[in-house]
Image (cartoon, rainbow, N blue to C red):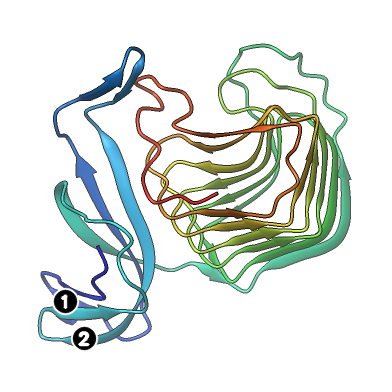
Amino acid sequence: RGDRTITVDEAGQMSSGDEVFVLCDDYGDRIEYAARNWRSRHYLLKQHLQVRSVDGNQIELDGALRHDFAGASPRVYRWQPLRGFGIEHLSFEDKNSIPDSEASNTFRTVRIDGSIDSWVWNVHFRNSTSIPLSIQRSRFATVSECLFNRAQHLGGGGNGYLPELYQTDDSLVEYCTAIDGRHALICNWTCWGNVFRYNRLIGTPNTETHGEYNVENLYLRNDARGSRMEIGGGGNTVHGHDGPHNEL
């Protein structure tokens, strides 16, 4: 943790400016914190970065590692994200009628997957089936001045998140309003270094770092007076350890 230079086999195949992500799997012993609250044997560590320079088998990254990649099989992958894609000044109204249940039938109105420097600005989502907006496997996304007004499906299996970051790093959600969801301002599965600031929650029971191993996320000056903030949500083999160094 804190290193900007790492040793990589076959680093000569990488070049300055390459987008990469560092990944490792941990199959360590199960750690039990309390009854029904434990870290399972497997969780995922991942961080998106950019290569600044290559020297032999050393690569210099554009940021420090946010955590120790001390688990099984640490490795680096090159990725080719879509750069500079955005949507703005739009409204979506969902006409689906999926019943509110515990069925896992998640439906996303808009999903942006594999992007860098993407944005969603002044977009209104009304009556979404389950998740209005999901930013996935991305870096440097900005979601600003958006309205997330109600999810019809609040049951289990990943429904009712207003909005969702999923395996996404170094992104910003600001000046948004989330009304009547299951969770709001969600970090879902290994989201690192994101900022949620100046958002407003109405009628949503909780904000959450959700899934497994979210690291160094900041929740700053959000109006969430009717909600609770959960770090360590789930507390079972599905959501066993939500990650360290988060700040509220």
Closer-to-camera residue (81/23): 23
Q: For the residues marked 1 and 2, what is the alpha-carbon distance in whole angstroms? A: 7 Å
Determine the secondary structure under disc 1.
helix
Residue 116 at what x, y percent from top left? 54, 69
Q: Considering only vertical position in the picture, is 111 above or below 34? A: below
Could you tell me which residue is drawn at 76 percent across and 18 percent down? 98
Q: Considering only vertical position in the picture, is 187 above or below 210? A: below
Q: 196 left or right of 174?
A: left
Q: For the N terminus, which image quadrant?
A: bottom left
Q: Earlier in the sequence, mark 1 or mark 2?
A: 1
Tag count: 2
The dot on residue 25 is: none
- Category of crowding for the residue at label 1, using alpha-carbon neighbours closer than 10 angstroms: few (below 14), some (14–19), many (at least 20): some
**What residue is pinned by disc 1?**
11
Q: 198 left or right of 127?
A: left
Residue 39 at what x, y percent from top left? 29, 28
Q: 197 left or right of 189?
A: right
Residue 236 at what x, y percent from top left? 38, 19
Closer-to-camera residue (95/136): 136
Quarter of the figure with residue 55? bottom left
**What residue is pinned by disc 2?**
54
Q: Mark 1 and 2 residues: CB-CB less than 8 Å, in contact? A: yes
- Category of crowding for the residue at label 2, using alpha-carbon neighbours closer than 10 angstroms: few (below 14), some (14–19), many (at least 20): some
The amino acid type, in three-letter code, at marker 1 is Ala
Residue 205 at what x, y percent from top left? 70, 27
Could you tell me which residue is drawn at 76 percent across and 29 percent down? 129
The amino acid type, in three-letter code, at marker 2 is Val
Determine the secondary structure under disc 2.
strand
Quarter of the figure with residue 72? top left
